[in-house]
Amino acid sequence: MPPSIVTSKLDLTPYKGIWDFAAVKHLLQRTMFGAANSDIQYFLTKDLKTTIDELLNPINNSVNPPLNDYTTTTVLDPNVKIGTTWINDPTNDGTLNSYRRASFKKWWVGQMINQDRSIKEKMSLFWANHFGTEVATISISHYVYQHHSLLRNFCLGNFKQLVKLVTVDAGMLRYLNGYLNTNTSPDENYGRELQELFTIGKDTEIRYTEDDVKAAAKVLTGWRINSSFQVYFDATKHDTSNKQFSTFYNNKTITGKTGSNGQLETDDLLDMIFSKTEAAKYICRKIYRWFVFYQIDADVEKNIITPLSSLFIQSNFEIKPVLKALLSSEHFFDVQNRGAQIKSPMDHAIGCIRQFNITFPDANNNYVDAYSLFNSIVSQLISFGQDPGEPPNVAGWQAYYQTPDFYELWINADTLPKRNKLTDLLVNTGYTKNTSKVIIDSIKFVKEICADPSDPNLLVNTLFSYLLSTDVLDTTKQNLKKQILLSGQASDYYWTEAWNSYQTSPTTINLNIVTSRLKALLKYILNTPDYQLA
Amino acid sequence: MKRRKFFRNSLALLAPTIIQGNPIYLLNDNHPLFNTNLLANVTNDNVLVIVQLSGGNDGLNTVIPISEYSNYYNARKNIAVPENAILKLNGYEGTGLNPAMSSLQSLFNDGKINVVQSVGYAKTNFSHFRATDIWMSGSDSDQYLNTGWAGRFLDQKYPNYPDQYPSDANPDPLAIQIGSISTLTCQGPVVNMGLSISDPSSFYNLLDGSADPLPNTNAGYELSFIRTIAKQTNKYAARIKTASDSVTQQATYPTGNSLANQLKIVARLIKGGLQTKIYLVSYGGFDTHANQVTSTDTTKGTHANLLGNVSNAIKAFQDDLAGLGVEDRVLGMTFSEFGRRIKSNASGGTDHGAAAPLFLFGKKVNGGVTGINPLIPSSVTSSDNINYQYDFRSVYNSILQNWFCVSESNQFEILLKKYPIIPVINSSVCGVANTTDELDKNTHIKNYPNPFSGITHIEYKTNGGHTRLELLNMVGNPIQVLLDFTPYTAGIFSINFNGSALMPGIYYLSLQNEADRHVISIVKI
């Protein structure tokens, strides 16, 4: 009988357990994409508190924006030279926008692959999932990037402020028709999702009413986008009547305002929504499911969600204190929660790239090769079911909300072989563009992670503990060592001799003897079901 | 008299020649001279089972040269099998088997075993890894190939794998490796053509029931889910499970014998209807540097146990195949990456060596011993090795052309060179084409009589251009240039060669015609 789900009974008490390789790896593979050896080693020299502080406080928030990688003899961009950024040149040209959206996705994947030693990329993705906009629907690449930058810049900031800015963000106004929401023709789309998906949620029985949705839509009337791609408030399109809310909101009335003061009603609406503890609890549950595990039962609700949401409210919806409390907790580090996440496609693909320290060309010096190779990864992510910037709908990817399966939705008979094929490809042939090649350098890799790769026992143990989050029987490791590293021989000496021969005499044949076995071993480990977990 | 009739008649009249106490029937009707124009690419449902004995099997204590017994004994007193304990082979008094191999002896005497003597290649590599890669890839000693010989065969037969597979026409895995990890043997140009059914994403568990236990945490819960998907996902899982489940009665296999366990699965899958062409099984522990026999009784010990298990496993497998009614379709071949040194070491073991015998087993083999006993010097040094009589790729070629009915031109693409066919497989399998009076388009060189003691008549065909005919010794080194010239025209020529000065044994004739090279083996008696 397989085990059943048992939620951790531990609470937010700070983790005082051992700060070892496994603990650091657990923290990093949840807060970054894959736990790279260099990062694990770096944080092993710190303590938990310092580590959390560094993860939550990225040193550098500036980014090099996405570039024109698309100009050819047939694809022309009149204002943006190839190799320079297009973000300051808004356009309505559909063809150009489609190329720029593609450029944006490649760029984003590049940001994730080259992430700094912080939680920033994971949180940017968290908000992209939370607000659930689709790049193809927003369509105008300028808005796509602007929206993404907003999420990125506020990814560790104030949640309430972020909701305010997203509400009047051009990308969101287009995505949920906010810009078409007028006094004469109200559009409820954003007013509904603001409550249902972005703040209050549907987790509780007692919640906002349909009338609350209509009232919220009226509050939000008048936000428009002009022909210069700027958001503005058009008082003439704003509904100036008083908006009456239900008992859920304590029968609150938002008084209609005229002229440019009409836009202040948006603040009133958000103040009203954020006065409900549901908003804090809803976000805390989403954060929990993002970083810890999907199952939230009464114990988790009591031990984690309730105190975390209190903290969120106390800190006036600052996101960092919540993350700090959760990620420092003994609940987070509980064995029940380790290795229990099925990797998202991005965790799988980008995590693998980072675990093996696969270096992509620098987009600043060689955007041609870099963007082409980033695009190879974008294609893989699409085939795995996580097209960057294109969640299936405004609710985000189902793996983060769909009961009862949650993360298991990432894995099926279609995606699992594809995920295995990607790791096979990275082990064996890699991707090549012009002179750039991205591939697992198995020899460099084992030298980096293993103190003595000539010792086949140490090598196998090191590979398993680095690459997998679940324990494997010693007999399994011994069998793999024997079958693969020793080619069926009993004596460890044969591998040691082969490794040392290559070190002293790096001929092609000696190289192939070592790499063919390392590749077979890596392929095996990366194909295990265990590798799908983090 | 037409020359063809001469061949036939001389064949009929030719009594077996006794060399080292063993009869040599070189010109049977399966000899390549009569058998080169094979029916090209006949489709059959034949199966090859490759048994890898990893570690380097001590060939001299496996197939023991009774005719050379005193030299054998002198070379390895501490591990030599007593002469009276050696198992006899019917019709081959000069050669016997290790006492642990009574099961194989019985198969031999039933005509289901062909022992090919001294198989190897030029410039043996003594590293397990490299030597294994050479055997699996079919490369020369100093050549690096990143595909396997069986992988190239399967790639030729089943192009575009795995993109259009499985299909209605080919619903089954092309090759299956039992209980181990994918090896180079079945590596194709793009992917491994073999399915390793101990792959974690696979279903060895369905057959075997073994797997790492699930952690008793939420990770274990999710792992269980992914394993289930992995089993469902395998394109071949249902076919293999159905095939395996459909066989409920099997012969008794020895217990505590991992090779027997693997072969039992193979028998089940073959009988269960899989169209898989190649199965690979492996059995390790042959790296017997020390204490390969018990000091008090050299018929017992580590090596005897290994040989006993191999022998019992193959016998049980062969009996099972017969009982299941699929014996006609299955050929087995053992191989080990190298043999071991002629002279034993002081630790009661043997160090890495060169050529060694291998076994072909099955109902369709030509039963017997192919080749002569290895020559053992009367005064042996620790660096003396057994030279090869047969290149291992000759064995591969014989299987390709005479078991899988691959055409000669196709086999060239697989093995990358021409290797002489060894008559180890019954000629009824792929059929024997009509021979013609003249050298046909696929035969470039032949001689008669063969074996010879004095003069032998050599015919050869040249397309014009530089033509060179050489005599090679059995390790492939040239010992005499018979001719080297540029003829005026293409055509068939002949010379007489007087070999009376040669030591008895196996030689090769090598015909080099511009870039083409053709080799046949000849025997001096």
Image: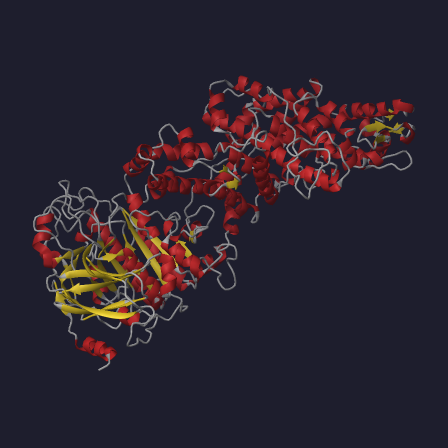
Q: Is residue B179 visible?
A: no
Question: Does B185 appear above or below A255?
Answer: below
| Image position, residue B40 (x, y; %) | 39, 69
Q: Is residue A91 visible?
A: yes
Front residue of this view, candidates A151 and A202: A151
Task: Name the residue at the front extreme.
Answer: B488
Left or right, B128 with respect to A410, comes to left
Front residue of this view, candidates A87 and B354: A87
Q: Residue at x 80, y 37 (%)?
A: A177
Left or right, A432 with respect to A141, comes to left
Left or right, B516 with respect to A96, comes to left
Task: Name the residue at the bottom extreme.
Answer: B1
Q: Total label count?
A: 0
Front residue of this view, candidates A391 and A224: A224
Left or right, A244 with respect to A487, comes to right
| Image position, residue A463 (x, y; %) | 42, 34
Front residue of this view, candidates A524 and A338: A524
